[in-house]
Amino acid sequence: MIRNERAVLYVDDNCKALRLLPSVLSGFGYKVVTACDARQALERMEHGSFDLILLGYRLPRTTDFKLLEINRLSPGTPIIVVSGYNLLVPEELPYVSAYVGEDTTLDDLLTQIRILIGQKNRINTTRPFH
C-alpha cells in the first residue's frame, strides 16, 4: 500500500496540545493519530504503522518499559520527545532519536520530523540524537 501522507503518532497528556499540534502538522501533509497516554499509544501501534512518534516528556504512566514496548512494536521508527523542559534523563537517550525542548520553534520541530522520516525511509533505522 502506498501512502502519500506520512503517519505520525502524537502521544501527550496535554489535551490542548493534542488538538493544536496535529492540526498544524496536518497542514504540512502529515496524518496525525493521537493518544493521551502510553497505553493508548501502544493500542494505536497495534492497529497501524507510523513513520514517526512524537512523545510528550514525563507522560503519566510512561516508563522505560513502555518505551521498550514502543521500540518492539515499531523497530526503527524515530521517536521525538517533546518537552517544555530542556533536560532529558540519560537512561532515556537510547530510545530517543531527537529531543525538542522549550526553546524549540515550530520550524525546528518540522525540520527534525522531515530529517528523521527521511532517514527512516532511506535506511530504515535510527541513530540516537546527540
Image: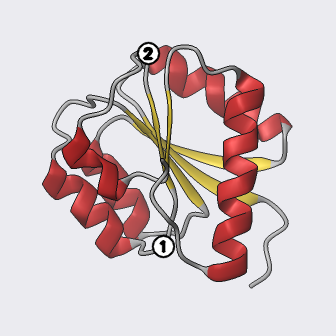
**Is 29 placed above or below 102 here?**
below
> How many residues crowd around disc 1 within 10 Å: few (fewer than 14), some, or many (20 or more)?
some
Which kind of residue does numbered mark 1 sit on? Gly
**Is 16 placed above or below 60 here?**
above
- Residue displayed at 24% across by 42% down: 90
- Residue displayed at 49% across by 65% down: 127
Does dot 1 land on a helix, a strand or a loop?
Answer: loop
Q: Give the percent coordinates (x, y) of residue 107.
A: 78, 28
Q: Give the percent coordinates (x, y) of residue 43.
A: 33, 59
> Which residue corresponds to mark 1?
76
> Which residue corresponds to mark 2?
84
Q: Specify which label sits upstream in the sequence, 2 or 1.
A: 1
As measured in the structure, the alpha-carbon distance from the residue carrying label 2 to the one carrying label 1 is 26 Å
Which kind of residue does numbered mark 2 sit on? Gly
Q: Give the percent coordinates (x, y) of residue 117.
A: 68, 61
Spot the residue most to the bottom.
1
**Is 1 placed above or below 84 here?**
below
Colour mode of the rendering = secondary structure
